[in-house]
Image (cartoon, rainbow, N blue to C red):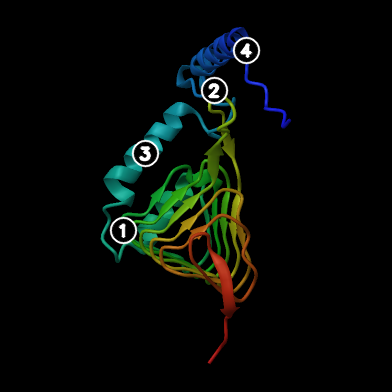
Amino acid sequence: MEERPKTEAPRARVERRQRDSVRDRCMQNLKIQQLESFRLPPGFRGRSAAFVQLWWIVQALLVKPLPQACYPLRRMLLRVFGARIGRGVRIRPGVEVTYPWKVVIGDHSWIGDNVTLYSLGPISIGANTVISQNAYVCAADHDYSDPAFAIRARAVTIEDEVWVASDAWVGPGVRIHAGAVVGARSTVTKDLPARMICVGNPCRPIKPRSTA
């Protein structure tokens, strides 16, 4: 005769359900994000809290709303607060720089309207590079595996002769190599090779960049 599979005994079934119930309650009680435990690492800002607040006031009242033609004044104010900016750099109205003392911009580069340089970590932009309007360069992230949501500075490097087109997002720790093009609204999460056209979410190289 064919042997029938044994069914789970009622007592074993009850015990299993009890174990599952205990496990589910433990998982529900496990806190994976407790923001009251968040602490900014010592020296993370690179300047005192008062200096940071002073910069944000100057940025809100002067740097961002200055008319387009005021490139020299905008460069001067950023340099006063520690940014290293090369010759002939054009920084348009609405640009927001979190910590200018962590920003380097090479000669003759352009930073378009309403670009955000979220420079909690270092941001280095090479010479003859264009960061187009509304692009966002993010040089920090959080450790999502840490319930305290620890913040981490992660340097971003955008080399010479790069074009980051409008609305692109460049993520923490990324290096965009010389001559690359990042397409509009692309999301850059990994390093990009030199002299390549790169597009998409996530951003990937699709073809070489040619010259006329």
Left or right of 6 in this view: 134: left
Contact, CB < 8 Å: mark 2 with mark 4?
no
Q: CA distance from mark 3 to mark 4?
A: 69 Å
Label 2: how many Cα within 10 Å (few below 14, some 14–19, many 20+): some
Residue 57 in the image, given as x and y percentages of width and height = 32, 38
Q: Amino acid at mark 2?
A: Ala
Q: CA distance from mark 2 to mark 1?
A: 36 Å
Q: CA distance from mark 2 to mark 3?
A: 26 Å
The first of marks 2 and 4 along the sequence is: 4
Label 4: how many Cα within 10 Å (few below 14, some 14–19, many 20+): few
Residue 153 in the image, given as x and y percentages of width and height = 59, 39
Q: Amino acid at mark 1?
A: Pro
Secondary structure beneath label 1: loop
User: Which residue is tagged 3?
Assistant: 56
The first of marks 2 and 3 along the sequence is: 3
Q: Amino acid at mark 4?
A: Ala
Name the residue at 41% across, 63% down.
185
User: Which residue is tagged 4?
Assistant: 9
The first of marks 1 and 3 along the sequence is: 3
Name the residue at 34% across, 45% down.
59
Q: Nearer the viewer, residue 131 or 77?
A: 131
Name the residue at 64% across, 72% down.
194
Residue 40 in the image, given as x and y percentages of width and height = 53, 26
Judged by depth in the image, the label closer to the viewer, 2 or 3, is 2
Q: Nearer the viewer, residue 7 or 65?
A: 7
User: Which residue is tagged 2?
Assistant: 148
